[in-house]
Each structure stands twice: as structure tokens, then as C-alpha cells.
Image (cartoon, rainbow, N blue to C red):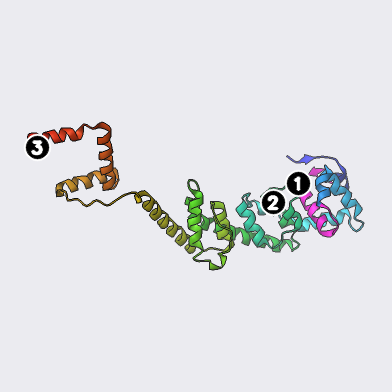
Amino acid sequence: MAIRHNDDLSDYLGESEINSRFDNWLLGFLSQINHFFSYEKVVGSGDTRKFIASQLRSQSNLDRAMILSERANALVPKSALNWFETSSRFLSFFSALWGHWPSIVETNPMGLSVAERCVLATDLKMIPLGVKSADLERLKSHWLERKDIGRRFEWVGGENEATKAEFVFSEVLRFRQGAILYEPVNSLEALLIFSDRCNLSSHEALSASSEAKRKLSQKKYREKHSAMVQLNVKIDKEVMKRLESIALKYRLSKSDIIRVLIDSEEEKGAYMSEKLAAWMRGDAV
């Protein structure tokens, strides 16, 4: 439901409906035509709409008809912006490729969300509306492509995220040698932002992801076996088959099965004594 309110700005524009997007655009518009525009005064005014109205009235070269015409020629339909997202990754992507990032969007004195900042940057770009709409469609397609490529790295999130991100990042650098001075990556979000900025291809992302998984697996294996020693013993072929069968059944290595049996014997201390007694009696075992 539209919020209607009668205040100084409503009186000036002849509009009683309050629209935060319109208000943000007006602030941005004023900041672009007035070199002495103060963001601090906006924040400190306590009433943003009253501040906007006073600024508009002080501009002798402006009138209501001109402002409404400028706004109509600047704002694309809301439906053209419904793909905007709220993540830091989207902000990085959009600000890098939109090509127009006014200081009021950068400093963000109004405390706008990521999506609202990107909307304002879109609204303040002074190009024909048709061109702006076409540019947004191209950017949307590119964003969807980047999101699809980013799915190659979804496994990085969650447990041990920093370690996994660092491994993938080291592999990505094989494709982007010039990015070696980039700030170290230790999270999924930072990894995705980096892959967007260097325009990593789907093939490169898949290769880096697969190689990182392989090296992580090797690292885990080395850590697991770092305290192990090799034992060379000869056992009956039938015993080996039984050992392999048990290992396959429980999806464990043969060394893990032996460890479980030894741990069990240490805890209970009964099975081996029974077997030894049977051997001594000459019973079959």
C-alpha cells in the first residue's frame, strides 16, 4: 500500500505518495547539480524529505516540471531491477561493471542496502532510458552466468571454509598470474568475488575446484598417516581375503580394520586369551 503524507516535499512536487526510490534519486540528482552539496547536512537534518524540499526551493534554475521530467527519463521500471541482490558479491560485481558509481552511492550517507545502492547508481546514470534498459539486460545475463560458474565452488562453504578457499584460490592463480598481488582469499564470498573480478571461465573454475579437492584429499591423507609406520608381515591368503572382505563391508581400509580389532581387544581383553588357550589345547581356530 502506498504511503501518503503531506509535507514540504509533497507540497513542492505536488505528490502525496512517499516513494523512497524517488527520494533517493532526488538526493543524488541534487548532489550532481550542486557542487556544494553536503552529505553531512543530509544525515544531520533529521528530516530528509524536508531537507530535499529546502534544497530544491533554493535552486532558482529548477522547477517542478523539470524535475519530474528528469526523473521520468532516468528511472527504468521496477521490474527491470528485480534481479538485484543484497550480497557483497553482487555489490562488487555491479559496481565494477555498471561504470557509474557516484560519490553519494560510494559514501552511502543514507545507509542504503546493497540493492538500494545499485538501484540509485542505475537511476543516476545519465543515458537514454532505452540504452539503460538494454545495458541492464546484458548485465543481468552476465550476472546469471557468473552465478552459474560460482556454483563450482559451493563445496567450499561450511566446515573448514577458510582452508578450502585458500586451496582453491591457489589453483585459480594458475590461470590468473597477474592477480598474485590480490588480497589473500579465505572465505567462499571472497573467492566468488575474486573469480568474478578476474572473469574466471567455467572450465577454469571446474579445473581449479577439482585440483583443490585432490590436493585437500592428499593433505588429509598425509595428516591421517603422519604418525603411522609401515609393518611388513606375511599372512595366510585366506586370512587376507577375509580381511579384505571385512574392510569392503565396512568401507574401511585394512589398516583401519586391524586398528579396530586391536582397540577392541585392549578394551575387553578376552578374545585373544580364548584363542591362545585353544591353540595350546590343539583345538582348531
Answer left or right for 186 relative to 80: left
Which structural element holds mark 1?
A: helix
In the rendering, at what x and y percent does residue 123 appear? 74, 56
The residues bearing labels 3 and 2 have C-alpha atoms spaced at a distance of 84 Å
Report the amino acid beneath label 1: Ser
Q: Nearer the viewer, residue 61 or 200?
A: 200
The answer to whether one can see residue 249 in this image is no
Q: Which residue is mark 1?
A: 20
Q: Residue at x 72, y 59 (%)?
A: 101
Query: Pointer 2: residues within 10 angstroms few (<14), some, or many (20+)?
Result: few
Image: magenta residue range? 13-38
- Can you give x and y, in whole percent of width and height, for residue 121 in the image? 72, 56
Residue matched to label 2: 78
Q: Pointer 3: what residue?
A: 284
For badge 3, the amino acid type reads Ala
Q: Report if residue 29 is visible in the image.
A: yes
